[in-house]
Image: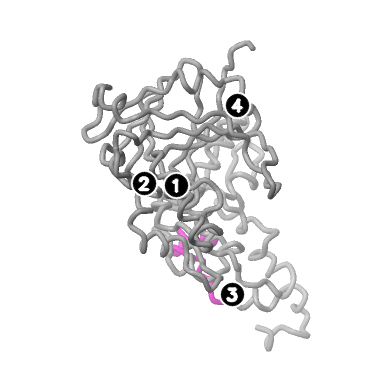
Amino acid sequence: MHQEFDGTDLDSGVNGPWFDEFGPGYCSNCDNCGEKFFLLEKNGDIYSCVRGQKNKDFYYGNIYQNSVDEILSNAKKKIFLNHNKTPLNEECTKCGYLYLCKTGCPFVKNVYKTNKSYTCKLQKEMYKDRGYSIDQYNDEFVYSYVNKMRLENVNDYLPVIKNENNYPTLEEIINLDPKLKYIYDDKSFILNIDGVEYNLCSQITKRVRDVIYISPESIIKIYMKKELINENTDYPENNSLYIMILSGDLITYGDEGRTKQRHVATHQVYKGVLEKNKEEKKGFYTLDISNLIKEYHNEYSDDNLNNLFFTTSALRDYHYYKQKNNAYYHIQAINLPFQNIEFYYVQKEEK
């Protein structure tokens, strides 16, 4: 193309506006172009654009018959559905230019019955020519894009944690020390909020986060796998379920002057008490913590996410023992590693 058009009367068009169709300032760069671009006919019909005009799959409604909210909602849904008529092309998740092309125009893809832009190879060369670099955070962008725009399972696109240091990764350290297993296990604690269950994971190993809303009327139960009470201790009767509540408000602690979430409360429930409670889930202790959470409602942040952690006293002690004896572990597990969930407390009672 450079050989044929550079220096000709078409030079500015080919190297300027024509290229812009594939660049970051054009509709094809949108995750969902139905959120930003519209074509209005004089009879009030709304379509996606000149390409989608008169095509029922790209018809959003009529301004004389539909509300603005209906039209905007239809636009977003129809573009999403048109992008998902074919599976996500795996090549698009690896090339590093997804942040620019977004797999191409949904109308054109459906016309050509393909799942990526038919000008893919040309676009890559044009990006290079214009100085657009390959996305160094491509994995993170792919995850974000799939989460918003695709029907594929987003967990299949979780970014890989890269070890750019010479010391062993946290995962390697955990695998080498079986005593660390239950500190990071994602099947040991289940939180039940008003009948909805959440499998809790360590906050420093999880790559997705759950945020819950708790009200004064919420019924909150924690299920702890019974075998945990025997782990890392010679005296299970002295072991306990260990609950930590942190506010979303920040405070500077200690000699090191580290700023972190304000600690609200620590609560321990020993084996003898746990065993007396009725078992609601096979193989798990059950504890209703509704009143415990409600008790500290005045301490929670309204603006920032609050935090709820679960472990056992024996596992907690081993975590700090490991920090003391392994600097590589300490570096990577300096924040609380225990199974957690973040929450907002809503409809606060009068103080």
Q: Nearer the viewer, residue 165 or 208?
A: 165
Answer above or below: position of 178 versus 37: below
- The Cα–Cα distance between marks 1 and 4, rounded to whole angstroms, is 21 Å
Residue 103 visible, this orientation: no
Where, by quadrant of the figure, is residue 201 drawn? Answer: top left
Q: Along the line of sight, which residue is nearer the eye, 245 or 70? A: 245
Q: Which residues lie in the magenta part?
A: 103-122
Q: Closer to the N terminus: mark 2 or mark 4? A: 2
Q: Which numbered disc covers residue 186? A: 2
Q: Which residue is mark 3?
A: 124
Q: Position of residue 312 (x, y in %)?
A: 39, 39
Q: Residue furthest top?
A: 350
Identify the residue position indicated by label 4 in the image. 300
Residue under label 1: 202
Q: Earlier in the sequence, mark 3 or mark 4?
A: 3
Q: Amino acid at mark 2?
A: Asp
